[in-house]
Image (tube, rainbow, N blue to C red):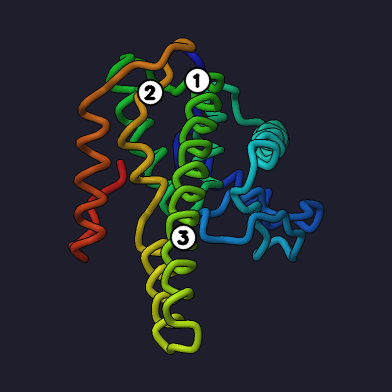
Amino acid sequence: MPNLLTQHELERRLLRWTGSSLVPRYPFFDSPSSSHTSYSYAASQSHLASGSIDDLNRWLYDVELAAHDCDIPMEQYTDVAIFFLKGDLNEVMQQRRSVYLGHTRRVFWEWADFKEDLKRVVEETNQMIGAMVRDCFGVLKREAAKMLDSPQIANLANDAIEQLRRAHPYIASSIKLGLIVGGTAVVLPALGMMTWNKLLRRQSGGPKSSLE
């Protein structure tokens, strides 16, 4: 049985690490609504936007360095990664962790399984966003041919952007994907139902439930 840290102690070590002047930036992995670029700001503002799998691979390496620097056991690397996720992706992976632990009866999410699962969620999300953007521009192109000088063009563009912002693509993409368990994708209907319910609550403006 691995000697695991409490969640409080794990977060205490990570917060101390990120507050150090020796740390060039927080290894946050941000939402797909951000620019698909890496930034290096002051530690309190820095993040890695979720653009490509290369970005994600670099971020996962940063997570491993952070865990090593903070003397966090490998069994809890997944907890470190989720700590540094932001927005919808953080909520999605917390839900997926709960279902993984319940399904496998383990006390930790295998790091290899987590990395593969996270990459699938990010890849599916990027594909979804690409399809949505193509659809939006297709509509704009058709409408522009009809109304070149019309103010309706600006309204259509604003509506398209707002629709993308409200879409919560990480939550939507997670509905489709089973969990990676031992290198194999396992279809878990309960996971899709949890994610779907959260998406409906978000769209209706209802209160958030606990993430754990």
Give the mark, 2 or 1, whose residue is nearer the N terminus.
1
**Type of the residue with mark 1:** Asp
**Circle 1 Cα neighbour tier, 10 Å, few/some/many (<14 / 14–19 / ≥20):** some
Position of 175 relative to 164 (above/below): above
Using the image, determine if residue 210 lies above or below residue 117.
below
The circle on residue 179 is 2
Q: Nearer the viewer, residue 1 or 77?
A: 77
Residue 42 sits in quarter: bottom right
Residue at screen point 65% across, 65% down: 45
Distance from label 2 to label 1 (Cα)? Answer: 8 Å
What residue is shown with label 3?
Answer: 138
Residue 165 image-quadrant placement: bottom left
From this view, report whether residue 25 is shown above or below residue 6.
Answer: below
Q: Are marks 2 and 1 in contact (CB under 8 Å)?
A: yes
Give the foreground label among 1 and 3: 3
Relative horizontal placement of residue 134, taking residue 162 as reference (left or right): right
- Can you give x and y, in whole percent of width and height, for residue 78 in the image? 52, 31
Q: CA distance from mark 1 to mark 3?
A: 38 Å
Q: Quadrant of the C terminus?
A: top left
Amino acid type at circle 3 is Gly
Residue assigned mark 1: 113
Within 10 Å of disc 3 (Cα), the crowding (few <14, some 14-19, many 20+) is few
From the viewer's perspective, is residue 35 above or below residue 127? below
Report the residue at 65% width, 35% height from top: 60
